[in-house]
Image: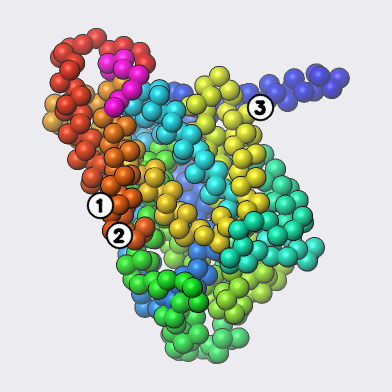
């Protein structure tokens, strides 16, 4: 009986097909509500309980924060809507299978492994965020700003429990976790706002007229914590724009927006950027100031909204980790083509959960999200140039699929050389993405011209 049940479970998991290696069919396209829910759920989420306090720690002023977030989040919405979504609805392919057509199997496998590991680490940070709330009833020691390694056995056990739950939800596929996010995101946003408002009196804010004075004197004072760098308007703007650079400019959300009926669904990201990366970052910064600089998400949410705040942290971590782990599973599947998606996602969940045991993922989140976006961005620029620009100057798109070449060396050199240039570019990490995008586009066009001169016009396409 056990073997029969096991076989039945395996068959059901195998049937959770997500068009991993082919375009999404018309009948499987999703309505705008699922995208609003997913973007709101993913970005009114666990990261917001971490990033908002980190802005406070880095000594941003109130004016620079509010203006920088407005500009950066608007640019992020436009990047999703005009760069990523139009390609997604035309190809209907995941990022990884679109790259395979352009770059061939070798480079795509390497990129996909790097991509998957980055997403695993990000999802791990969100599992750690949820764990700070789950551990509250057990008086679990909370990780501190400078903690690198697990600080207790209870921390490890709770992370394992949360990781198992998140992995199970990611295995169910896009429609299931999008529905979960759609249900949870309005409630999470209200908890963020309520918690932030609730602690304002503790900071001396007795009326709406007091807010700006309190914001400048006690929350975003312009004075960084000891050992932390000073942030300006430009840090905030570029971070708000590029913290999800891998998703929009880096084209990772081809894997999500391929289910959209119209490219305009890319504008659904506005619900994540302004309810999450604007309002929620502000509210969590207020909570950090009220908690006298504490940055552990569970305790600061509990301070503002009690048990409801703690539950919100748990759910917020899940709604970010679920789609991130889903993307990681799709990426790894390119390198393990004979595995079913659920098996790959399970493996990615194991890596993610182990990574979540290390609090440094959370405490260094600003630097990590800037770094992972920078590493993954060049391939998004390659896709943009390949799809829109090469045909307009008489060059082939989908080079590897058209020629049968297992490696598009123009794409490989563009990616690696751009990263090398950015490594030595004398700019802070937050500012390197914009010049990097133009560098890789120019490199890819020039190198493609050289590469394609070797192939005679009218060559019969071959399968990669």
Name above or below for residue 188 compared with residue 16. below
Q: Is residue 369 visible?
A: yes
Name above or below for residue 454 compared with residue 17. above
**Label 2 secondary element:** loop
Residue furthest left as drawn: 393
**Residue at x 37% of width, y 36% of height:** 88
Q: Position of residue 75 (x, y in %)?
A: 32, 57
Q: Which residue is mark 3?
A: 13
Q: Position of residue 207 (x, y in %)?
A: 51, 89
Determine whether label 2 and label 3 are within 8 Å by CB.
no
Q: Which residue is mark 2?
A: 427
N-term mark: 2 or 1 = 2
Q: Which residue is mark 1?
A: 435
**Residue at x 59% of width, y 80% of height:** 292
Q: Nearer the viewer, residue 297 or 350?
A: 350
**Residue at x 58% of width, y 45% of height:** 322
First to last magenta residue range: 401-409
Q: Residues within 10 Å of mark 3 (few under 14, many from 20)?
A: some
**Label 1 secondary element:** helix
Determine whether label 2 and label 1 are within 8 Å by CB.
yes
Front disc: 2 or 1: 2
Name above or below for residue 237 compared with residue 26. below
Front disc: 2 or 3: 2
Front disc: 3 or 1: 1
**Label 3 secondary element:** helix
């Amino acid at each position: 009986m056990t073997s029969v049940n096991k076989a039945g479970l395996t068959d059901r998991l195998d049937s959770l097909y997500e068009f991993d290696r082919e375009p999404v069919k018309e009948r499987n396209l999703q309505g705008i509500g699922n995208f609003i829910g997913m973007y709101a759920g993913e970005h009114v989420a666990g990261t917001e309980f971490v990033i908002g306090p980190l802005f406070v720690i880095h000594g941003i002023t109130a004016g620079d924060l509010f203006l920088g977030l407005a500009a950066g989040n608007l640019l992020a919405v436009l990047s999703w809507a005009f760069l990523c979504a139009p390609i997604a609805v035309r190809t209907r392919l995941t990022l990884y299978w679109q790259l395979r057509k352009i770059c061939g199997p070798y480079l795509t496998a390497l990129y996909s492994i790097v991509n998957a590991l980055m997403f695993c680490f990000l999802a791990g940070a969100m599992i750690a965020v949820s764990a700070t709330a789950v551990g509250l009833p057990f008086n679990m020691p909370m990780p501190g700003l400078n903690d690198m390694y697990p600080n207790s056995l209870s921390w490890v056990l709770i992370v394992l429990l949360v990781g198992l739950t998140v992995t199970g939800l990611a295995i169910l596929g896009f429609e299931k976790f999008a529905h979960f996010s759609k249900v949870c995101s309005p409630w999470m946003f209200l908890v963020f706002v309520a918690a932030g408002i609730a602690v304002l009196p503790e900071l001396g804010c007795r009326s709406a007229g007091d807010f700006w004075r309190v914001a400048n004197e006690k929350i975003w004072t312009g004075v960084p914590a000891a050992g932390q760098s000073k942030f300006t308007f430009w840090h905030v703007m570029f971070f708000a724009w590029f913290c999800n650079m891998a998703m929009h400019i880096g084209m990772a959300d081809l894997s999500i927006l391929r289910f959209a009926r119209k490219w305009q669904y890319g504008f659904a990201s506005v619900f994540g950027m302004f309810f999450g990366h604007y309002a929620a970052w502000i509210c969590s910064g207020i909570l950090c100031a009220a908690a006298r600089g504490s940055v552990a998400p569970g305790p600061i949410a509990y301070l503002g909204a009690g048990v409801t705040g703690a539950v919100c942290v748990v759910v917020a971590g899940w709604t970010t980790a679920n789609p991130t782990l889903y993307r990681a599973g799709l990426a790894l599947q390119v390198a393990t083509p004979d595995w079913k998606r659920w098996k790959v996602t399970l493996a990615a969940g194991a890596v993610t959960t182990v990574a979540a045991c290390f609090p440094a993922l959370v405490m260094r989140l600003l630097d990590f999200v800037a770094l992972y976006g920078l590493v993954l961005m060049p391939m998004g620029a390659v896709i943009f140039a390949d799809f829109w620009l090469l045909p307009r100057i008489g060059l082939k798109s989908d080079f590897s699929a058209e020629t049968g070449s297992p490696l598009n060396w123009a794409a490989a050199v563009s990616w690696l050389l751009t990263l090398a240039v950015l490594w030595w570019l004398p700019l802070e990490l937050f500012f390197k993405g914009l010049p990097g995008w133009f560098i890789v586009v120019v490199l890819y066009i020039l190198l493609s011209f050289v590469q394609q001169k070797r192939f005679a016009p009218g060559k019969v396409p071959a399968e990669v």
